[in-house]
Structures are given as structure tokens and as C-alpha cells.
Amino acid sequence: MEHRMRNTNKYTFKSPDLTELKKLGFMMVSREDIRARYGRLVGILKTKVEDGVLNTLVQSYDPLYHCFTFPDYQLMPTLEEYSYWFGLPVSDKLPFSGSEKTLTPVAIAKALHLETSIVKANFITKGWILGLTSRFLMEKAFVFAEVDNRDAFEAIFALLIYGIMLFLNIDNFVDVNVVRIFLISNPLPILLGYTYHSIHHKTKKGGGTILCCAPLPYKWFISHLAGSRLFRENPQKLRWSQRFMSIDQGNIHWYDPSYDIGVIIDSCDEFPNAYLLGVHGGIIYNPILAIRHLGYPMEDKPDNLLLSGFFYLNKEESSGFKDRIIHAWSNIHKKGKGRLGRENYVAFEPYTQWVCARASELEMPCAPENPSFPYAIT
């Protein structure tokens, strides 16, 4: 069968300088304390992202369904998977909307165990937004580490990871939006939204630098391909595109019981899916395409009425529609095992045919290849 191929684009994932953050990491007294309060931030900080993996993955992004489409399967990160990698539960609490009241230096000082006068003196505007420089916060974190003020050190260390790594915006600057997200303590919908929104925006533009935190989508993606010998070994030094296109749905590590919390967030309010709001705008999230990741079968092709490619940038959005999305998060709908089907994470023929047709319509970035050496799932 002849496969039509489309042109590829050049993408990069922003790689901030983490040298000083890692130095702070060595000054931790209790990694368990930080994990209990803020999640697996240290593990994310130490993740080494292999060059070429994410750039190759993004070539397969499907802008219509907001997933990654391959010749006979689809992959997409989920809230439940991000919950596992981040080490925090998915909260029903309204995530960051951008409509919150402006943070005051008093509130920031209290959260970071700093004096209000010091925060006021270092509260500056950069790129039309208020915030604190990472240099100022670094200096305070080092001071608190030296005097063994653990609460203050851990709070500032965690905020720095949020600002420098998780929610990249302005270099060497932690703006008030990042501080808001940190204080809301429900980062997962925003992190997942940031991943989708950043990738969608740059693929729509045909290339560029993607701002979302690279370690999280990297950890997610590699976890699904960890069983393939092509990703554990590379005796023939295949290009990443060759390694990707040599894998079919039978070689994917579909299900990890660690992700299984019994229910999934399926939709919000009157919407048939979920909307993710973030710093730069909003994007639709279609959990119906990802239930296989969580151990449930894909029995039929999805109803197109339940899917959506909605996406907007803040500067373009309708405030009325945004208000509806904010309201929708007050009425989260979840599905449990009784409605999701038997746990066998297989794909039935109607769904597979639908994916293959979509892959043909979308066109793959390179031709499928058969590996020239045997491999197996372990």
C-alpha cells in the first residue's frame, strides 16, 4: 500500500538553564516532605529528555482531534497520567482561569514566608506583567537553606520549579500567573492544557519553539513505548522517525495500573468533553480517545459529535464563552468501570478502521517501516 507523506516542520522545546535549581535540589533536607506537599517536582527536574523524541512526536500531532495519530493507533496524554507523573491527585477544584483577583505582595509574602516590604521592593513589571525575578527567589532560597528554614525553602524551591520549568513564560522571571497557579494547588489541568495548547499553537503556525514543560510529555510518551525493543535498544542506530514508524499498536504499553484511580474525568457540565484553560488560552480535551490508556477497550469509532477541535488564544477569545468554561468546571462528570467497559484495553475493528482512515487523511510525516530485527514486548 502506498502511503502519502506530508512535509515535516522544525520544532524545539524550550530548555531553560536548570543549573541553579539543581543546586537547590542538593540542599533539600527531606525529599519526602516536598513530595507530600508539592508532588514529584524533583523527579521532573531531574528528567533527562533525549533530543529528537519530542520533535518527532509532534510531527504526528492531529490538530482536529488534539491527539497524536499514527498509522493504526492514537496516543494522547491524560489528566490521570499526568496525575501519576506529577504525584498529585486530580482535583475537582476550579483550576486557573485568568479571572482571579490580582495577587498582592501581602499574599505572596505570606505564601513564601517573606516579609511584605521585601516582596514589595522586588515586585517588578516585565513583559507587561508583574512578578519576581528568579534571581531574587534563588537568593532567598539559598539563605533559607543555610539557616534550615525548611518551610520557606521548600515553598520557594517549588515555586521556582513552577516558574522556570513547568509554566515557562518570560526567562528568569516568575510572574503573578505562575504564583496564582502555585497557590491554587491544582496544577494538573493547567499543565495538561499547557502541553496541548503549546503544541497545537506551534503546529498551527508550522514550526517554532514549544514552551510546555518537556519532561512531562516525554515521560508520558516513553512510558507507552518502554516495552518495545526499538526503544530499549538501537543496534542499527535508526533515526527516531524510523523507530516511531516501525511500531504498531501491538507494541504499545497501553495500560499501567498505577494510573487507575477507578474513575476518569469524562466531561464538564453541558459539554461532551472537557475544556482546559491556561495562561495563554483554552483548548478542548477529548478523554473519549484515551480510555485505552486507562485499561478500557476502544469498541467503536467515536461519535464525531462528541469530539471537538476547539482552541483559542487569550487575545482572540470571547469572554462569554470563557465564562461558560469556568462555570463548567463546577460540574465535573466522571465515568467509572461500570460505564467504561471491561478492562482489556484492546481496539476493535471499527475503531481501528476509523484511525487508519484518519491517518491516511492526515498523512504521516514518514512512511511506515518494518524493523529489520525482531522485537518483543516484555
Image: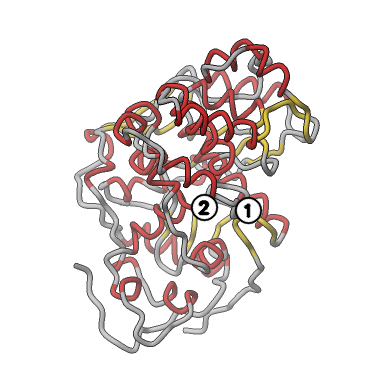
**How far across and how far down the image is residue 1, in percent?**
46, 84
User: Could you tell me which secondary element the residue under label 2 belongs to?
Assistant: loop
User: Could you tell me which secondary element the residue under label 1 belongs to?
Assistant: strand
> Which quadrant: the C terminus?
bottom left
Tell me the kind of residue under disc 1. Ile
Tell me if residue 145 comes above or below residue 198 in the rendering.
above
Left or right placement of residue 313 versus residue 324 in this view: right
Tell me if residue 183 comes above or below residue 76 in the rendering.
above
Tell me if residue 285 comes above or below residue 108 in the rendering.
below
Left or right placement of residue 118 versus residue 331 in this view: right
Decide which of 194, 316 is in the foreground and name it: 194
Please name the residue shown 45% across and 47% down the image. Answer: 45
Tell me the kind of residue under disc 2. Ala
**How far across and how far down the image is residue 181, in percent?**
55, 26
Q: Identify residue for label 1.
A: 210
Q: Identify residue for label 2.
A: 214
Q: Which mark is residue 132?
A: none
